[in-house]
Image (cartoon, helix red, strand yellow):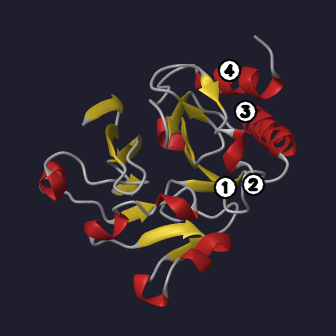
Amino acid sequence: MREILPGVVHWTGTHPKLGIEVSSYWLVPERAVLNPLLPPGGLRAFQAEPPESVLLTNRHHLREAERFGAPVHAPRVGLHEFTAEQHVQGYDDGDEPVPGVRARHIGALSDDEFALVIPRARAVAIADGVVRDGDGPLGFVPDQYMGDDPEGVKDGLRAAFAALADEVDFDALLLAHGDPLPTGAREVLRRFATGSS
């Protein structure tokens, strides 16, 4: 676990079903974890201040969320993925699923593709619409995960990310797949969305 911004801790782990390395985050002042796997050391890693909420950027990021014993929040449009016994709480575009974190609908890849904006940290957490191979450049998931019209999905994502970069003040990008970009991310995302170098 490594603090990449004040009050934002990042760690990686191997997804138990997919067998690939994914990223998770601990928003310390908000007492919330994003798209979490358990960190090395399990819940003991949080010491005396365990998370009070779990935030998912889409329905597929449940990962090990239930092991945290905290309320789970996911996009309302994706709640069909969960059982009533899981007690997952839904959020919509513009909601604050926890104080200080605002939901922003992205769509295009799936109806429940969301970004979570953390103004305090000048950071945005992204679901699966954009990924990185480790610390490489931003990219899209492979076409095979984009349905029948990959180019149309990419166009929709580019439009949503261009609007996000235009309308939201952020400097860091917290990716679910790949290393985060702790600085300069707004311009990187804008260039990615517009195809400029």
Where's the N terminus, which quadrant?
top left
**Percent coordinates x, y for residue 78 in the rendering:** 63, 71
Is 111 situated left or right of 78 in this image? right
Q: Earlier in the sequence, mark 1 or mark 3?
A: 1
Mark-to-mark CA distance, 4 and 3: 7 Å
**Percent coordinates x, y for residue 60 in the rendering:** 53, 61
Q: Earlier in the sequence, mark 2 or mark 1?
A: 2
Q: Are marks 4 and 3 in contact (CB under 8 Å)?
A: yes
Which residue sits at x=12%, y=54%? 44
Determine which quarter of the picture holds residue 94. Answer: bottom right
Element under disc 3: helix
Badge 3, how many Cα within 10 Å: few under 14, some, many 20+?
A: many
**Residue topped by disc 2:** 107
Residue type indicated by callout 4: Glu
**Residue topped by disc 3:** 165
Q: Is residue 135 above or below residue 32?
A: above
**Residue topped by disc 1:** 113
Q: Earlier in the sequence, mark 4 or mark 2?
A: 2
Which residue sits at x=45%, y=26%? 134
Q: Are marks 2 and 1 in contact (CB under 8 Å)?
A: yes
Q: Nearer the viewer, residue 123 or 119?
A: 123
Residue type indicated by callout 1: Glu
Q: Nearer the viewer, residue 47 or 60?
A: 60
**Percent coordinates x, y for residue 118 in the rendering:** 52, 45
**Residue topped by disc 4:** 187
Q: Are marks 1 and 3 in contact (CB under 8 Å)?
A: no
Badge 1, how many Cα within 10 Å: few under 14, some, many 20+?
A: many
